[in-house]
Image (tube, rainbow, N blue to C red):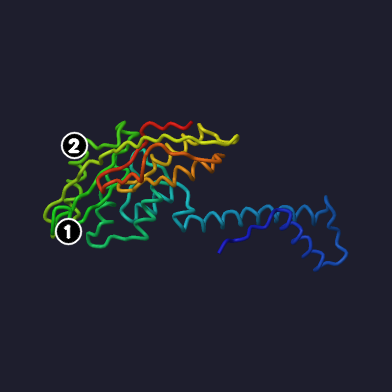
Amino acid sequence: MAIPIPTYDELLNAILTDYVNQFPGADTAKGSLIYVKSAALASAFWGLYRYQKYAIDQIFPDTSDAENLEHHAFIRGLTKKTGETDPELLGRLLNYIRRPPAGGNANDYEQWAKSVPGVVATYCIPLGQGPGTVDVVIVADAGTYDTEIPSPELLATVKDFIDTVRPVTASVIRCLPIEILPVDIAVAVTGSDADRPKIAADLTSYLNALTPGQDFYLAQIINIAVLNGANTVAITAPAATVAAGPAQVLRPGVIDVT
């Protein structure tokens, strides 16, 4: 439950009211001794309320500050990777809390891989080569490597780490590089309020946010165009839903909005 924090004026008025209730006729006008003492108390109480709220916020990972967020992660065996933002660390931590380790299920493999510096996304394919096998698709940090396709060295690092934590029943583990499939979009829109550069930018952002194995639907083009002022939308490309396999991720190709 959220803690209501009275304002300074509310606290001051409450203290002055208490004085009047206890000492009817007392001088509580601004500048009086009672007023000065009440103002000092109100200021101190306001600070205590603020500190109490801060302390309670630190109990929960999603409201804690950066230092305490890292501590919440640390006690669960998670560390902040180089270049990782606080929201990204919080996402990893919340996933750990909501989906705790479960003896080597698909989520475990994805979280083990994402704990390796330089990995931003993963996709686990259970039984990828048959019973006792697991394939883990790796997406590299483009900000670090200038590409989402992981290097052989990064793949080897991920596999070496997974081998130290995986169940012994998993006989064969493969760490696979993500395959990037560019999606070309050609669309014509009408409408005096249609913001064509914004439509193109939003389509680019949407495609860049897709995860491995996630498909791209034509309806999304229409939705983005209409939200940016288009009255009609005529799609030339792609001709149909663009599907991605479990080891593939869709990314923007040539985006043409006329």
Q: Which residue is mark 2?
A: 152
Q: Quadrant of residue 45?
A: bottom right
Of residues 198 and 96, the one nearer the viewer is: 198
20 vs 167, left or right, is right
The circle drawn on residue 130 is none
Which residue: 53% across, 43% down? 226
Q: Residue at x 67, y 58 (%)?
A: 6
Q: Amino acid at mark 2?
A: Pro
Q: Amino acid at mark 1?
A: Pro
Using the image as rendered, state which of residue 68 and residue 19 is in the foreground: 68
Label 1, residues with CA under 10 Å away: few <14, some 14-19, many ≥20: few
Indicate the secondary structure of the residue bearing disc 2.
helix
| Mark 2 residue crowding within 10 angstroms, few (<14) / some (14–19) / many (20+) | few
Mark 1 or 2, nearer chain start: 2
How many angstroms separate mark 1 from mark 2 (CA)? 24 Å
Q: Depth check: 71 or 158 in front? A: 158
Direction from residue 32 to residue 47 in the image, left or right: left
For residue 125, side relative to residue 238 (left or right): left
Residue 189: give x, y in percent of width and height: 51, 36
Relative to residue 136, is residue 30 drawn left or right?
Answer: right
Q: Residue furthest right?
A: 25
Q: Nearer the viewer, mark 1 or mark 2?
A: 2
Q: Is the N terminus in the top left, top right, bottom left or bottom right quadrant?
A: bottom right
The x and y percentages for residue 120 are 32, 43
Residue holding disc 1: 167
Residue 102 image point, x, y percent: 26, 62
Which residue is found at the position 52% from the left and 56% from the top?
A: 55
Q: Position of residue 115 (x, y in %)?
A: 29, 47
| 176 w.r.t. 96: above or below | above
Secondary structure at badge 1 equals loop
